[in-house]
Image (cartoon, rainbow, N blue to C red):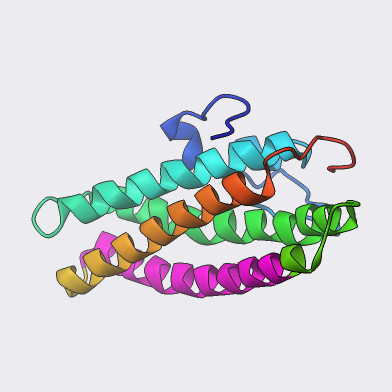
Amino acid sequence: MLLIGTPLEKSDMLTTTTTYSAGPTETKTGNARLDSGQRTLDWLYRAHEEQLALCQELEDIADSLPASVNRQKCIYAAKALGPLIKGIHHYEETVLFPHLQARPEANDHLSTTLERLKFEHCEDECFAEELTDALLRLGSGAAVNMEAVGYMLRGFFEGLRRHIAFEREHLLMGVGQEGML
């Protein structure tokens, strides 16, 4: 497993900023430490670590259901979820994937894989929107079906962990920093 850089602190995971001015082709992640850095391959590894930290927070929420819900944690996770997922997907689809396809060893199998990952990104973003709504309701104390929310949480974080593992094992092995902006 490739890990570049150090994992960000849990407190950094849900920190947001309004001072970052994204360029015309960048999308904010909602995370101050990610939004302040240049988008490189090292940035992507840090972003993956942020996603994995969020997965752990979501797993903690799922484990706390139904009786020990930390409502504030639900609201923080809900606010972090969409921007983080969309920002990272934007980078992958507009920078990483074109870079991989431009490499001399690119082939039809790679193109098929990248199309599959783009489809997964779309599904993950839709699922993240639904999960955000459920977390906000849970965080506000509204009545929710705890079993359904737990199922949603586990489905999302398990799928995201698999997605990140696949990208690291099949796409990022041997990819250097050259040309990655």
**Segment colored magenta:** 112-141
181 in magenta: no
- Of residues 111 and 129, the one nearer the viewer is 111
Q: Residue at x 62, y 66 (%)?
A: 117
Q: Residue at x 28, y 60 (%)?
A: 139
- Of residues 167 and 7, the one nearer the viewer is 167
Screen quadrant of the C terminus: top right
Q: Magenta residues: mostly which secondary structure? A: helix
For this orientation, the residue located farthest to the top is: 6
Q: Is residue 129 above or below residue 163?
A: below
Q: Residue at x 25, y 68 (%)?
A: 151
Q: Residue at x 67, y 40 (%)?
A: 173
Q: Is residue 85 above or below residue 111?
A: above
Residue 131 at x, y percent in the picture: 38, 68
- Of residues 140 and 97, the one nearer the viewer is 97
Occupied quadrant, residue 35: top right
131 in magenta: yes
Q: Is residue 93 left or right of residue 159?
A: right
Using the rendered image of the protein, determine whether residue 64 is visible from the camera's viewpoint. Answer: yes
